[in-house]
């Protein structure tokens, strides 16, 4: 049943992605100010928003675990965070390549890049800490606590960097100022949907691995007992 | 509630008394702060005016690195002889245990900071005396943020392998907003341009409020499970 | 200029997909490893129980 869900999500995601890529590259003209590289937006921004979506799912599940002590929540949380980290990495790398063309530098410590990197680091700590705790309940509890702390920190990070007088090179948030060409809105939305579908398929795969892992733990205990 | 606060005070006094008897963490921390200051003197070769621009940043780097030594120990020192289990099993509420340890670490870290400040000023020719009281205010606010999050993570990493490695990896990214605020304000105070630091100070205060309430609320899950 | 632009656009999308595929590969390898471990443990438990 779950395998079928993975296949459906995966195929749907791939089909929509193909359609979307066709729209982006064949249907739309180049952006006036930036040229062809402007189309990087279609993977850069949806990756970030997809990552935020999965981080949010993970935080909700972390709270759910603390409240209910059900390991399902812990499994979903770790799977969602791993997928979210992947998309954050995509966002950072595509942003860096874009920046290289547009601003001539590979990196700058402006608001968005820095806060994305901080987000990546915070949840990297989460992923690093998990294998270091052997006992399952403790691992789940501490991971949940860490995920909640990290989520509480993100708004503060954004607030702090916004104040920090850094060379602000990031172009004014294009989506917020509404400066996006209306014909670009649908492919952007579609890009987000595609990544969420693919991400969900990956979460389901990872979820199955968590279940197998727990089975392994219980078999090991049984072996010890025999 | 009152019982809890009394218990917290008791734990704070216990930790402080133990530490003042041996002074091992204090000594190690102050020495480490001095070593870091020494390393910075090799790392940077700036003119006086340029150095003032990074003065606050460097100061807080020194404090955070030295603080890690103090904050790491708070829960881990209770692990031998099952002291931690006894403390958790006692009628004292978990938040009181946590608050007591935080207050103890806070006092210790503040001592380290106050000792390092004149040395920092001496090594780098920084005039800080004119801004001392306001700087002290910032030190109190930011140190509270460092200790409350650090002691919480110390509790989290009690049962984690490689905990000395994990704690900085987990703690420092979290501290970033606090450090940005503290560094900006400190630099402004030392340079004498303290006119518009209200915003940065607000971040430090918000960080303290958010993480104090979050940590006090979640500490029960961390300690008791 | 436009050619450079398009080249880097290609690099960008390629990098994105390499990262995602890299993650998929990590998942697949981990999955194979734990499936092997699971079957090994299952056979061990069966052996011990039959004895």
Image (cartoon, coloured by chain):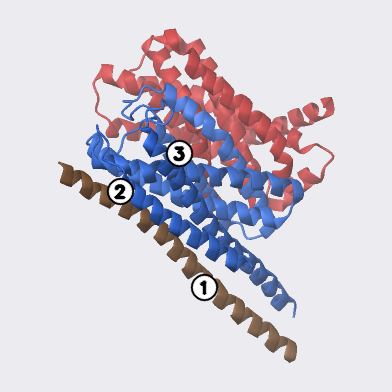
Q: Colour of chain C?
A: brown
Q: Nearer the viewer, residue B186 or A71?
A: A71
The subunit letter for the residue under badge 2 reads A
Q: Colour of chain A?
A: blue
In the rendered image, which quarter contains the N terminus of chain A?
Answer: bottom right
Disc 2: CA contacts within 10 A as few (<14), some (14-19) or many (>=20): few
Q: Nearer the viewer, residue A70 or B180?
A: A70
Residue located at (67% from left, 59% from top): A136
The subunit letter for the residue under badge 3 reads A
The residue that mark 1 highlights is C33
**Residue A133: percent from the left, percent from the top?**
61, 57
The residue that mark 3 highlights is A118
Label drawn at residue A25: 2
Residue B27 visible in the picture: no
Residue B34 sits in quarter? top left
Q: Colour of chain B?
A: red
Mark 1 secondary-structure assignment = helix
Cα separation between marks 1 and 3: 32 Å
Label drawn at residue B116: none
In the rendered image, which quarter contains the C terminus of chain A?
Answer: bottom right
Name the residue furthest bottom: C51
Disc 3: CA contacts within 10 A as few (<14), some (14-19) or many (>=20): many
User: Is there a contact, CB below 8 Å, between mark 3 and mark 2?
Assistant: no
């Amino acid at each position: 049943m779950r395998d079928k869900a993975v296949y459906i999500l995966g195929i749907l995601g791939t089909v929509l992605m193909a359609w979307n890529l066709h729209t982006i590259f064949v249907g739309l003209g180049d952006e006036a100010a930036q040229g062809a590289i402007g189309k990087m937006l279609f993977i850069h921004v949806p990756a970030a928003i997809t990552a935020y979506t999965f981080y949010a799912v993970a935080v909700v599940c972390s709270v759910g675990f603390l409240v209910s002590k059900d390991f399902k929540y812990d499994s979903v949380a770790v799977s969602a965070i791993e997928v979210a980290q992947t998309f954050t990495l995509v966002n950072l790398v595509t942003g860096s390549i874009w920046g290289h063309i547009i601003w001539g530098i590979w990196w700058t410590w402006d608001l968005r890049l820095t806060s994305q990197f901080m987000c990546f680091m915070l949840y990297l700590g989460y992923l690093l800490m998990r294998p270091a705790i052997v006992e399952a309940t403790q691992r789940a509890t501490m991971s949940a606590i860490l995920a909640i702390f990290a989520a509480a920190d993100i708004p503060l990070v954004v607030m702090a960097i916004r104040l920090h007088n850094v060379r602000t090179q990031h172009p004014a948030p294009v989506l917020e100022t509404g400066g996006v060409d209306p014909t670009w809105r649908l492919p952007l939305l579609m890009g987000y949907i595609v990544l969420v579908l693919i991400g969900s398929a990956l979460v389901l795969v990872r979820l199955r691995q968590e279940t197998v892992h727990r089975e392994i733990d219980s078999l090991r205990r049984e072996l010890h007992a025999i | 509630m009152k019982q809890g606060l009394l218990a917290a005070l008791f734990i704070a006094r216990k930790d402080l008394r133990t530490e003042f008897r041996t002074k091992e963490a204090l000594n190690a921390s102050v020495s480490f702060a001095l070593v870091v200051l020494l390393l910075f003197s090799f790392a940077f070769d700036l003119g006086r005016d340029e150095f003032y621009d990074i003065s606050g940043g460097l100061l807080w780097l020194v404090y955070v690195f030295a603080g890690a030594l103090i904050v790491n120990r708070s829960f881990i020192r209770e692990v031998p002889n099952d002291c931690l289990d006894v403390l958790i099993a006692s009628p004292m509420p978990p938040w009181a245990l946590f608050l007591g340890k935080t207050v103890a670490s806070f006092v210790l870290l503040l001592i380290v900071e106050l000792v390092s400040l004149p040395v920092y000023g001496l090594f780098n020719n920084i005039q800080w005396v004119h801004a001392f009281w306001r700087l002290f205010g910032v030190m109190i606010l930011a140190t509270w943020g460092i200790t409350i999050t650090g002691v919480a993570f110390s509790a989290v990493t009690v049962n984690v392998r490689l905990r000395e490695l994990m704690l900085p990896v987990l703690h420092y990214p979290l501290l970033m907003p606090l450090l940005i605020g503290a560094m900006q304000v400190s630099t402004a105070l030392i340079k004498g341009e303290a006119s518009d630091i209200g915003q940065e100070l607000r971040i430090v205060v918000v960080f303290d409020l958010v993480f104090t309430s979050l940590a006090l609320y979640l500490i029960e899950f961390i300690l008791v499970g | 200029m436009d050619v450079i632009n398009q080249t880097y656009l290609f690099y960008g999308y390629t990098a994105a997909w390499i990262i995602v595929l890299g993650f998929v590969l990590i998942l697949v390898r981990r999955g194979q490893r734990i499936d092997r471990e699971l079957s090994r443990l299952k056979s061990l438990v069966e052996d011990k129980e039959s004895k």
